[in-house]
Amino acid sequence: MKKIIIFSIFTILMIFSLQQAVLAEIKEEEVRKIPSKLIKLLPTENKLKEITHRPIWEYVDKQSTLDE
């Protein structure tokens, strides 16, 4: 009887630990999917120049000095 109880407790603990490992792998896959979506949403270099008017700011930066 003691052997059956010990075996059942051991089995329950093993199942619980395996379940935690599987849940961790599922969450890790979800985290990996997010950056790939972000890369697709980020603008390209040319689009970024259009959005931020970077050439204007580059010109202003060249004209300014560190003393100001």
Image (cartoon, rainbow, N blue to C red):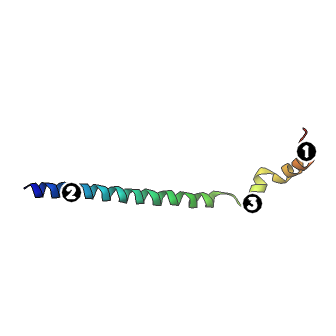
Amino acid of disc 2: Phe
* Name of the residue lying farthest toward the top: 68
Judging by the rendered image, the residue that carries numbered circle 1 is 64
Image check: 1 left or right of 20?
left
Q: Quadrant of residue 42?
A: bottom right
In the depicted structure, whether residue 66 falls above or below residue 8: above
User: Which image quadrant: the N terminus?
Assistant: bottom left
Judging by the rendered image, the residue that carries numbered circle 3 is 45
Give the mark nearest the N terminus, 1 or 3: 3
Judging by the rendered image, the residue that carries numbered circle 2 is 10
Alpha carbon distance from label 2 to label 1? 72 Å
Q: In this orientation, which residue lies closer to the viewer: 22 or 42?
A: 22
Alpha carbon distance from label 1 to label 3? 24 Å
In the structure shown, which secondary structural element does the residue marked by tag 2 occupy?
helix
Badge count: 3
Give the residue drawn at x 69%, y 58%. Answer: 43
In the structure shown, which secondary structural element does the residue marked by tag 1 occupy?
loop
Q: Are marks 2 and 3 in contact (CB under 8 Å)?
A: no
Image check: 27 left or right of 49?
left
Q: Position of residue 62 (x, y in %)?
A: 90, 50
Q: Position of residue 58 (x, y in %)?
A: 85, 52
How packed is label 2: few (under 14 Cα within 10 Å), some, or many (20 or more)?
Answer: few
Give the mark nearest the N terminus, 2 or 1: 2
* Name of the residue lying farthest toward the left: 1
Amino acid of disc 3: Glu
In the structure shown, which secondary structural element does the residue marked by tag 3 occupy?
helix
Tell me the mark number nearer the camera, choosing from 2 and 3. 2
Amino acid of disc 1: Ser
Tell me the mark number nearer the camera, choosing from 2 and 1. 2
Q: Quadrant of residue 38?
A: bottom right
Q: In this orientation, which residue lies closer to the viewer: 54 or 1?
A: 1
Give the residue drawn at x 46%, y 61%. Answer: 29
